[in-house]
Structures are given as structure tokens and as C-alpha cells.
Image (cartoon, rainbow, N blue to C red):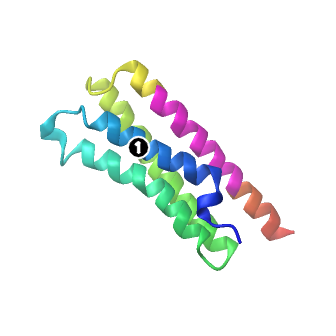
Amino acid sequence: MKTHKDLLVWKKGIDLVEQIYKFTKQFPKEELYGITNQMRRCAVSIPANIAEGSGRKNKAEFIQFLHIALGSASELETHLIISQRLGFLSINSYDEIMNALNEIIKMICGLINSLNSTRSS
């Protein structure tokens, strides 16, 4: 039986968490309990909600957790924009993370659509 660890979107989510931790290590120390913490928490939330949802008993619950993961992705996107504007992230770092995040968002949306189509058929 497959688990969340077999899902490519979950694996990419874990990779994103590593990226976020790597880049936020360079943020100002006074931001440790501010935007650094917020970015790390919402990045971790993405694969965590994918994992939790995939462990649920039915597709509707899985879809609900995928929507929560999308919300965390949107929150992370906002923190990335703010971090780049404040000069905490270079434009190259910002682009690198945003490309990874956008790919994950598309994959989550695709998974939701797939689950919805199999649920209604």
C-alpha cells in the first residue's frame, strides 16, 4: 500500500522545507521569532498536511487537508514577497524558492482535481 512518502508532491514539500531553513538561517537574528519562524512553520505545514490528509480514511478528508496545505503555501508566498522586499532574500533566492513553491501549488491543485474526479465517478 502506498503512503504519503510515495507522493512526489510530499517529497517536493520536504525539499522546500530544507530550502526555507537554509535561506532563513541568513535572516537577521531579531527576526528569529518573527518572519523566520512564520516562514518555517508554514513551509513545514505543507508536507505535514499532505501526509496527514493521505492518512485519513476518505478522499473528502484528504482533499480538506490538501486545501489547508494550499493555504500554507499562500501564506509562505506572502512571507517570501515581504522578505524579498525587506532585503532578507536576494532576487535569485526569491525566484528559486518561488519556482519550487509554484510547482508544489500546481501539484496540489492537480491532486485535488484528480481526487475530486475519482470521488464523483
Above or below 33: residue 81: above
* Region in magenta: 96-111
Above or below 69: residue 81: above
Above or below 74: residue 27: above
Residue 73 image position (x, y, % from top left): 48, 47
Query: Looking at the image, which residue is at 78% across and 69% down?
Result: 119
- Identify the secondary structure beneath mark 1: helix
The residue pinned by badge 1 equals 18
Q: Magenta residues: mostly which secondary structure?
A: helix
Residue farthest along the right direction in this orientation: 121
Residue 31 relative to residue 48: left or right: left
Residue 3 relative to residue 86: left or right: right
Residue 112 relative to residue 40: left or right: right
Query: Looking at the image, which residue is at 18% across and 49% down?
Result: 33
Residue farthest along the top direction in this orientation: 91
Residue farthest along the left direction in this orientation: 30
